[in-house]
Image (spheres, helix red, strand yellow):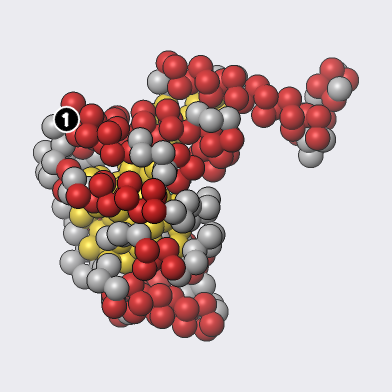
Amino acid sequence: HAKRQGDGRHIHSTPNLLQTYELSAGIEQDLQRAVMKGEFTLNWLPVIDTASEKVVSFEALARWHRPGYGDISPDIFISCAESAGLIEQVDGWVLAAACREAASWEQALGVSVNISPVWISHNRLPSLLRRVLDETGLDPTRLQIELSERVPFGSDGMTRRELSQVRAMGVRLALDDFGTGYSCLGLLGTYPFDQVKLDSQFVQAIGRDRRAEAITRGVLQMVQSLGMTSCAEGVETEEQLAFLDAHGCEEIQGYLIGRPIPRLPRQVGSVRAMDQA
Ligand code: C2E
Ligand code: MG
Ligand code: MG
Ligand code: MG
């Protein structure tokens, strides 16, 4: 067992299967404890209206400092939580914390929360939302739920009814990471999404890959024809912003606009205002 060989070097080399197993077994126990004790924190990623460059909302992103290991990427702990059956609790914690914080903001900005599609179709999201909105007093129209298509969705009537209930409450729905996962285009026709979030992979191809650019233009047009809005993720350059603006992408987010921050400045106006804060 590599960890007991004593020279420490093995820890940094590519883990073998057994080590991977041991690490993930440990992570599950630690996640379980983190869920019980609420060891997570939030970061906020600003979203702007492309045309006016005004901040319209913030996306809540979960952060976990794993004791003895440091900060673990959400890509890792979220998928661990999904396979360990803990994701509903993690998402529930994030939802409640995000709504509570948003309700205390000076400005009535939008708030987006990621919910894993893994626990959709059991009809537990509508009641959780009702409870959280009730407890925090947040106006439901300020809340958007993002469902990533990285994980397969139930394609059944159950999922559709559940999402329709959420929307009937006034909460908005977004399809996240569009174009990277299980996006059969049918999802857009079947489920009541308000917004499509174009994955950063497409944004990063702007100015580099003509074919990917053509897909991006086509997706933006299709989303608009379906009566939904688009938000592009991972915008890092002015060139990407200009392209997205020219092709009708209503909202954007990314490091060009702002990095995730643990706390909002007192007044949130334009992007430049945030830079100075
Ligand atoms: P996402 O929902 O697509 O969130 C956007 C991710 O892109 C965030 O990574 C953000 O920090 C990163 N990002 C934003 N702008 C840029 C940019 O300009 N360049 C680059 N390279 N990256 C940018 P993060 O925070 O590591 O989150 C990763 C994913 O973890 C999220 O992707 C989301 O799918 C998932 N996640 C985070 N929090 C939660 C949660 O509470 N529940 C669930 N189910 N999933 C979550
Ligand atoms: Mg998201
Ligand atoms: Mg996303
Ligand atoms: Mg993404």
The residue carrying pointer 1 sits among few (fewer than 14), some (14 to 19) or many (20 or more) residues within 10 Å by Cα, namely few
In the rendered image, residue 275, in percent from the top left (x then y), is placed at 27, 50
Q: Position of residue 269 (x, y in %)?
A: 16, 52
Question: 121 left or right of 131?
Answer: right
162 or 101, which is in the foreground?
162
Q: Residue at x 47, y 83 (%)?
A: 214
Quadrant (top left, top right, bottom left, bottom right) of the N terminus: top right
Give residue 211's position: percent from left, percent from top.
Answer: 54, 82
Identity of the amino acid at label 1? Asp
Give coordinates of residue 257: x percent, y percent: 32, 57
Counting every numbered tag in the picture gives 1
Q: Is residue 136 above or below residue 254?
A: above
Q: Looking at the image, which residue is at 27% across and 67% down? A: 228
Compared with 235, 214 (above or below) is below
Instruction: Answer yes or no: disc 1 within 8 Å of ligand 1.
Output: no
Q: Secondary structure at mark 1?
A: helix
User: Can you say whether 261 is above or below 97 in the image?
Assistant: below
Q: Quadrant of residue 216?
A: bottom left
Residue at 74% over, 32% down:
20
- Residue pointed to by mark 1: 134
Q: Is the C terminus in the top left, top right, bottom left or bottom right quadrant?
A: top left
Is residue 100 at least partly visible in the picture?
A: no
For the question of whether residue 23 can be seen, the reply is yes
Identity of the residue drawn at 19% across and 59% down = 54
Residue sticking out furthest to the front: 157
Quadrant hosting residue 9: top right
Q: Nearer the viewer, residue 82 or 37?
A: 82
